[in-house]
Amino acid sequence: MFEIILFAGTSEGHRIADYLRQTAFKALILTATSYGKQLLLDSAGLTDESEMNSIEIRSGRLDQADIETLLRSESVPGALIIDATHPYAAAASENIRSACEVCERKYIRVLRNGLSNSPLVNSGSGTETTADETRASRLVFPDIPSAASYLNQTKGNVLVTTGSKELEAYTSITDYRTRLFARVLSLPSVVQKCSELGFEGKHLICMQGPFSRELNEAMIRHCQASYLVTKDTGVEGGFPEKEAAATVCNCTLIIISRPVSEEGISVETCIKKYLEFPGGLQL
């Protein structure tokens, strides 16, 4: 029976997982995909799951019912459930949170700081902001469809860095096949999906991020992009590097707001408050 169940999939989850393998906790780490599992091992400099000591890793998507079954059958009554999923994985977090309420397990949300904490940007639907004379203008939209609707009224190339999951929304742009360049993960299934949507050849960039400012800048110039579309991924997700590159290239930054407003704690607080002590869980 597990004392800790960690829903990973982000750099925050990787850091907590790396800490857990140095403890005596009986823990289970969950990633949505096998690729996410491999990234977790890579981040810890490991080649095999057996090097995780008392930690078990599983991959696969779970709905609320699946999570409830897992909590009831494989976690101790006082287990700590840590949600370190991506800030844009709203449905996943809601499933985890609801399952914990039903099964009466302690739920902890580990959440990276985002753009909403910056005084330089006012969130809103298509709200344009300018921090100073040297900073590129920024537009903030509540979701990808609304950003795509705006882009459909503009001219100029677009570098899209919001991933493949919602890429279909951009096909509403009249000339998307010639204007848009999608940067996605280099997975066969992702490439196939993008190709089916019409993103091929030089309009499809397959790489694993986050990226440096210099590389973002080079891509913007290569695509001759007038717009760079990004999610509010925070420092860990490479947002500052995208912002800096857009500024240098005089490229308008289009930001997709986080889907829900939620509260959470940092990795450091999670470790210090819940994991950094002898003799069991501090609840």
Image (cartoon, rainbow, N blue to C red):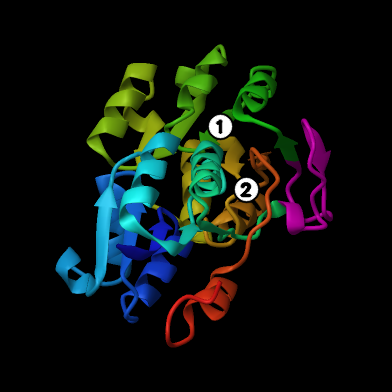
Distance from Cα at disc 2 to Cα at disc 1: 17 Å
Amino acid marked by disc 2: Asp
Above or below, comparing residue 77 to residue 174 in the picture: below
Residue of label 1:
158
Q: Where does the image place residue 6, in percent across and percent down from the top left?
A: 41, 59
Q: Which residue reaches farthest front?
A: 77
Q: Which mark is residue 22?
A: none
Q: Where does the image place residue 255, in percent across and percent down from the top left?
A: 66, 41
Q: Secondary structure at mark 2?
A: loop
Query: Taking the image as drawn, is residue 121 in sight?
Result: yes
Highlighted magenta segment, given as a residue range = 116-138
Q: Which mark is residue 232?
A: 2
Q: Quadrant of residue 150?
A: top right
Mark 2 crowdedness (10 Å alpha carbons): few <14, some 14-19, many ≥20: many
Q: Where does the image place residue 85, in percent across and percent down from the top left?
A: 48, 51
Q: Residue at x 19, y 64 (%)?
A: 49
Determine if the magenta segment contains residue 133.
yes
Above or below, comparing residue 21 to residue 64 in the picture: below
Name the foreground residue: 7 vs 146: 7
- Which quadrant is the N terminus positioned in? bottom left
Above or below, comparing residue 229 to residue 23 in the picture: above
Amino acid marked by disc 1: Val
Left or right: residue 131 compared with residue 1: right
Left or right: residue 42 compared with residue 216: left
The answer to the question of whether label 2 and label 1 lie on touching residues, with beta carbons closer than 8 A, is: no
Q: Residue at x 42, y 85 (%)?
A: 279
Q: Earlier in the sequence, mark 2 or mark 1?
A: 1
Query: How many discs appear?
Result: 2
Q: Taken as a whole, is the magenta stretch helix, strand or loop?
A: loop
